Amino acid sequence: MIRRGALLAAALVSVGCVRDSDSEPVRRYLVYTKEVGWPHKPILIGDVDGQDMRLLTRGEYGLVSPDGRAVAVARGSETRTVRPDATGESLLGRGKPAGWFADSRHLLVFRARELVSVDTEDGDSTVLVPEVNLLRGWSVSPEASQLVYGLARKESRWGQCGEYIDVYVVDRDGRSRRRLTDDGRSSDPVWGDGGIAFAREPVKPPCVMPKAGIWTMGSDGSDVYPVVRQAPPRFAWNGYYGLRPHGWVTGRSLLLAGVRTEWGDELALVDLRNARIRRPDLDPRPRYRRSMYVDHVSRDGRYVLTTGCGAEYPCTISIYSVLGHRARHVVTGRVGNAHWNR
């Protein structure tokens, strides 16, 4: 059984130089889509800080593999892969890419009504979640062998309120599927070195207003612990709908969370030691607030990639430094679908 102290200790472990299976340094990239809303959109790739961007290919969006050797591209009803230097483009199959396993060989793909794991070397596929319309968040294990996910029951009503949701885990080969929670109010798991963080509603559905807090547990579902038992009132009314986790911050007793809104999740930092929640404010004026939305979190949780838009374009892609408490704008325009392997 993993105790709370062990979870905190694991969250504080530092990360060394990241290398792939061939002991070569991993190359970090950032990709985003230009001219969003138009057909045959250009997908650009560049340094992980958004410098030296260049045309990679065309499609809807791209997902960079953890080792930086390939980019999965959604184009029409197909998934393709291409090298960062724009060579070696090949068809992987039908469906839309959803995310990579940490081994950079297996790709998660939304195919019809299923979430499947596709071996990018031999093309074999395995169904991991048979009904994606019931999927409520997912995350891959750090060692790339398992998928943890939230799944609503078929008899649930549509929407966050009225759904009975639990957290499950399944091996990458589709075997050993098991349920980690049985309360009907747990969802949005995030797997990190500190264990599994997940959102949990304080009462069973149907509920009046989502007030999910953030809890943690071990990889086997043991040692369930409430970091924030339920969302404070300021995060559960007037357009806010509770919390959900987004990542663990390596080297710090911090979790990255999102405050749910209709426009996306506003970034919040949760202190694991005392459950204090702080939302970064990017507006220097004392009576104004400018929050940022969480799109993708770096592997160590120290950087957040986000795309901020108004009611319409232009949008701004930014990188926020969690420990530096500042954001840097990458590009502004008709842009979106930013992704990286930081």
Image (cartoon, rainbow, N blue to C red):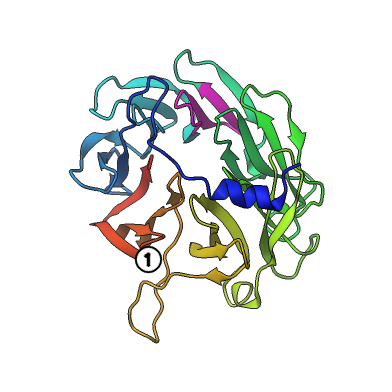
Please, what secondary structure does the residue beneath circle 1 have? loop
Where 225 sits versus 170, above or below?
Answer: below
Residue 322 visible, this orientation: yes
The span shown in magenta is 100-118
Q: Residues within 10 Å of mark 1 (few under 14, many from 20)?
A: few
Where 81 sits versus 234, above or below?
Answer: above
Residue displayed at 27% across by 48% down: 49
Residue 23 falls left or right of residue 299:
left
Q: Position of residue 89 (x, y in %)?
A: 30, 22
Of 111 and 165, nearer the camera is 165
Does the magenta segment cover residue 22? no
Of 118 and 252, nearer the camera is 252
Where 58 sits versus 155, above or below?
Answer: above
Residue wearing tag 1: 325
Of 132 and 142, nearer the camera is 142
Residue 250 falls left or right of residue 148:
left
Is the stretch drawn in magenta largely helix, strand or loop?
A: strand
